[in-house]
Amino acid sequence: MLVDHHCHLDFPEFAPELDAVVARARAAGVLTLVTISTRIRKFDEVKAVAERFDDVYCSVGTHPHNAHEELDIPLERIVEIAQHPKVVAIGEAGLDYHYENSTPSAQAEGFRRHIAAARETGLPLEIHTRDADEDTIAILEEEHSKGAFPAVLHCFTGGRKLAMRALELGLYVSFSGVITFKNSEGLREIARDVPLDRVLVETDAPFLAPLPFRGKRNEPSYVVRTAATLAATKGISPDEIAAATTENFFRLYSKAKPPKSVSSTAGGSAAA
């Protein structure tokens, strides 16, 4: 089996056929999904999707694009919401200087608050970082000195320095369909060096569909393609990468439960 630990099933792109999207994921062997929060004030919409399907979980958090809109939401509220049985992660939160929809200071404040929530709840933080490697490293190092916290660099597209420093701090690194793109050789070189026990795969659907679907709407079933490219990059079989990333997921997202039909160590097939 495979896990898509980062998708956005509450987005309007999926509304007309959400049941079919989840069914296609299951048919492809993607048996556990995490739909990710981008606004705490819209958490009920994310929660509704997670509650609709047995093996769909969710997170709670504020995307850096929206950081300035939710700085008034206290840490205690994030921690409170995270007690819901379907919430298995915090975020996504972090730094995005590509668009700067929020100011860097607002993003940093939100990032630190979400780190505190991950530390307090023990749930992994889904970190969004783009064009902000140095500031991300600085915040991770400073916050780690206050106490360790579980986290993953989601949809990793940064530089080698960020990836390696995150690994040194105990974080995981996740790869999306970007790793399949022809111009992503540098990213594949980094992926090759991420230890097998610290790597995850995701879609970030509806964005960033892998080849041969690039430019189309992404969906969780397509994580099979990302996993196949990651396996080839590492010189191992698709079944091996499926087994490793699934085991890594349930180790990091310890609140999530393996599907009833498989054990947490089952590899399954990663073939489409």
Image (cartoon, rainbow, N blue to C red):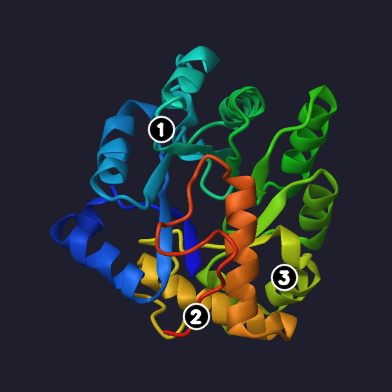
Residue 161 shown left or right of residue 239 in the figure: right
Q: Which residue is mark 1?
A: 85
Q: Secondary structure at mark 2?
A: loop
In x, y percent, where is residue 77?
45, 16
Residue 140 in sight here: yes
- Crowding at dot 2, Cα within 10 Å, few <14 / some 14-19 / many 20+, comes out as some
Mark 3 lies on a secondary structure that is helix
Measured Cα–Cα span from mark 3 to mark 1: 32 Å
User: At label 1, which amino acid type do we have?
Assistant: Pro
> In which quarter of the view is residue 244 placed?
bottom right
> Which labelled disc corresponds to residue 269?
2
Q: Position of residue 211 (x, y in %)?
A: 46, 82
Q: Please name whichever residue, 134 or 240, is drawn nearer the observer in this view of the structure.
A: 240
Mark 2 belongs to which amino acid? Ser
The quadrant where residue 57 appears: top left
Q: Secondary structure at mark 1?
A: loop
- Crowd around label 1: few <14 · some 14–19 · many ≥20 (10 Å): few
Give the spatial CA distance, label 2 vs label 1.
Answer: 29 Å
Marks 3 and 2 sit apart, C-alpha to C-alpha, by 21 Å
- Identify the mark nearer the N-term, 2 or 1: 1
Give residue 59's mark. Answer: none
Reply above or below: 53 against 138.
below
Q: To which residue does mark 3 refer?
A: 191
